[in-house]
Structures are given as structure tokens and as C-alpha cells.
Image (cartoon, coloured by chain):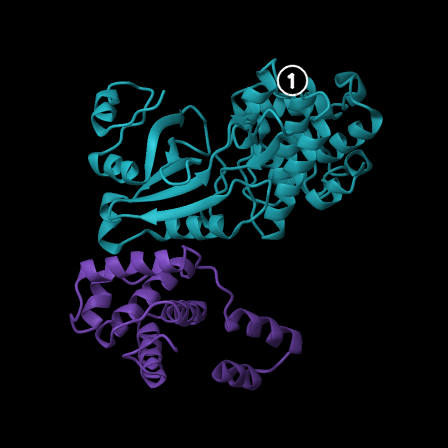
Amino acid sequence: MGINKLEDLKWHEHDIAIPKLSTNQAEFLFRFYRDLERVRIDTLSCFGNVISCIQRFSNERVAVKILPIPQDQIINGIPSSILNHASILKDLDHPNIVRLLQVVATEEDVYLVFENVNLNLERYITNPMLSIDTLERSVLRQALSGLAYLHSHNIVHADIDPFSILFKYTLEEPPVVKLCGIRAPKTSTSQGHPSYKAPELLMGSTNYSTAIDIWSMGCMFAHIIKRRPLFNAIEEHRVLAEIFCLLGTPTEETWPGVSSICKFIQAFNPPIQPKDLAEEFPTLEPVGLDLLSKMLCLCPNSRISAYEALDHPYLRH
Amino acid sequence: MSIQTEITPHMRGVLVNWLIEVHFKYDLMPETLYLTVTLLDQYLSQVTVKRSDMQLVGLTALLLASKYEDFWHPRVKDLISISAETYTRDQMLGMEKLILRKLKFRLNAPTPYVFMVRFIKAAQSNMKLEHMAFFLI
């Protein structure tokens, strides 16, 4: 449902479906865009309040994210966090990363104009009309190549979850995967969905290495194969318990240094034995299982890198 | 500099010298200074600037560079007072947005400094060579 006039928008302010816009914000948006429509506010981490609009001149659909400048910082102009965020995103140019098309700054807000992307992974998997049987490899390959690009720019995503993996989908062409929700490196604290969080983060490590993104990608891979999340818990300690049940508990031999991150790990004596992944994923061929086990390797230093994963036999053909 | 009608390369030199002093006064990181000059040059290569606005462009470039690169940035109020209240806050915030628009929000430009740091490390140089190298760039 689109709206075309400012009056309509005011009327809709009572409607929870549309994020509240101030008069200035609404006027600004109407000058350049028409047909405002809320995309989603229900995503947990990345996109937050995103308004989908049609550009007046090109007729192209875009997604606008509004970053308000905090009241106490207005006197000093645009805050450095927003500046960092915008200029890093602006420099990224890869087919599997959501493009930041334009940044516009006004007195009170900064508007980030992204290319519009239709679906997130969660909705893609649960939609019975869209078959992804043949697309598992393609989806994983695209997501990993976007990630490899980020890692080559020394950026750790840190927030990969079912809502930050988006699909650009048209009936004619195969879907294109787009990663979104990339934040500035200085502000990285993971708030992502706990079910995609790497074990070292769940155990309280604050070392954000590129390996945490690979773990999340492994969870995504498993999610696509199983059509439901690999780990279901919402509380972090329960996710960790689920991980240990599936993959066993780490020891100093399998993960050097683990006991310094996590004191209680030695209490698991003897350690829990890992389950057979082939039983958990009966539909996945052995070469796929091999890649999955390398992505879901408990020790971050032995986990496969994005580049190595792209070169794995499962994805090479 | 070919598009500039009112300002000359010499004036850019004077401005940069003054910006180095301001940069020193606020004790900012060396990366910030090089980024300031890069941003200034990029802007001057695209926009014809009036003589009276030159200092404003320089100060705003310093503000943007320190916001982007440094742990800390000088307040707009302080930058205005350092220019002897020539400009107002609104002018500086307006200039900030104008520069960002012209540079399309891309502030992570490579500067000579980062390359020199790498070369010096590779050359395993001593302090004397290091100071010499930074003086030259």
C-alpha cells in the first residue's frame, strides 16, 4: 500500500505499520521519492526502520534508512560514527553486497539510500512457492563471495543472521544474494541473532575475527539445508549448549587456548563426543558435509576462511 | 587548480601551512593532517571557491578528517574561534554538507602518509631517515 500525499502520511501516523516520520523527514522524502511504503521494522538487527520508496525520476525502487543525528551532537554537525559508517559503505562495490546508492545529509538527519532488495533469508526459506532445491550451492557461493570481499577490506560483518542475508528476486532470473547490515568497524559489538553467533563469542570472547562470520555462514548453510535454524534457542547459554550437543565440547587439543576464554570448559570431563553430521543432514552429499564441518569448526583459528571455502570442491563446480 | 578564478596555488600553500599549525595545536594524529589536505585538494579540484571562503573550506576539511580518522575531533565552536570568528556555525555546518555532497561521502581516500609508514617499515629505517621522509611528503 503506497501513499502519495503528505496528508495521507499524517493520517497513517496512527498506523503502526509506518514508522513515525517528523514533518521535516516526510517533506524531505516527498521531494525526491513517491509512494512511500514501510519495508520492515521487525528485523532484529541490521536494517531497522527502512522505508521503501520509488524514485521520482528514474521510477526505481529504493530503500531509505534514516539515521537521526542525536540532539546533543547537532551543534557539531554530522557525528563521526555516521560519517565512518556511510563512507565505508559507499566504498563497497560488490554484486553480493547491498549497494549504498546515495547519502544525503540535512540539518537533523542523514538519509542512506540503498538499492531495494525483496526478501530476507527467513522469508525466502519459508515461502513454499520459491524452490531452492537447486540453488543451495549458488546461494552459499554468492554469500561467501560477498563475505570474502568484505574480509579483503578488513571488515568483519559480525552480525550475519537470517535478516541480514537478502535476496533480489525476479521471476526471470535466479535470485541474487545481497549481504546487508554492515556497520563501521569502530562500533562493532555484535548484537546479532544468538542462534548464528560463533561459540567463541557465546563464551564471552571479545575478539572479533573474520572467523565469526564464517560460523554464521555455516549456520546459514545448515539453515537452508534443513529449512529451519540449526540452533533454535534464544538465550545465549542455551545456544552454546545446543552447539556442544551437536559438535561436542572443545578440549585444549582441538582448540588451543579454549580454557583461557572459558573457565568451565574443563568441567566437561570426559568431553561430549560430537554427533555424526551425516545423520543430522541426510540429504546433503559427503562433499557438502565436509565443507559444513569446516565452517562449523569450534576452534576459530582452524575454521576455514571465506576464500578457502569458495575454493572447496562443493562450490567449485 | 585550473577552475579556480580567485585563488592561487600560493594561497593554498599558505592555507595548508596554517592548517598544520591548527592540527598541531589540537594534537591530532598525523593521518588526520594528510587526510585534511587530500579532502581539501579534492574539493578544490571540483568547486570554484571564493577567496573569502578558502579558510572555511580548510577548517571544515580538518573537521571532517578528524571526525573520520581521529579518536577525537575539535568542536565546531573552537574551530570558529580559531578563525577569529570570521565564519558562523551555520556556515561551517553548511560547508560540511557541501563537501560531503561533492565528495559523495567517500572519505577513505589513500594518503601519502599510509604508504610512507609502510615503506619506512619495509626499509627498516632509523629515526633520522623517518623524519626526513615525513618532511619530504
- Give the image location of residue A295, x and y in percent: 71, 35
Q: Please, is residue A19 above or below residue A281 in the view? A: below
Quadrant location of the C terminus of chain A? top right
Q: Is residue B27 visible?
A: yes
Q: Can residue A238 be seen in this view?
A: no
Residue type (three-letter) at the residue carrying disc 1: Arg
Judged from this view, the residue extending furthest toward the top is A128
Dividing the picture into quadrants, the one containing residue A262 is top right
Tell me the cyan chain: A
Between B10 and A122, the residue placed more toward the observer is: B10
Dividing the picture into quadrants, the one containing residue A263 is top right
Q: Residues within 10 Å of mark 1 (few under 14, many from 20)?
A: some
Determine the residue positioned at 74% across, 26% down. Answer: A271
Left or right: where does residue B59 sit relative to residue A272? left
Left or right: where does residue A34 sit relative to residue B123? left
Tell me the purple chain: B
Q: Please, is residue A169 above or below residue B115 in the view? A: above
Left or right: where does residue A276 sit relative to residue A176? right
Which secondary structure lies at badge 1? loop
- Give the image location of residue A220, x and y in percent: 63, 28
Q: Which residue is tagged 1?
A: A227
> Residue under mark 1: which chain is it in?
A
- Give the image location of residue B118, x and y in percent: 60, 71
Quadrant location of the N terminus of chain A? top left
Between B115 and A31, the residue placed more toward the observer is: A31
- Give the image location of residue B26, x and y in percent: 32, 70
Determine the residue positioned at 58% across, 16% down. Answer: A126
Left or right: where does residue A125 sit relative to residue B56? right
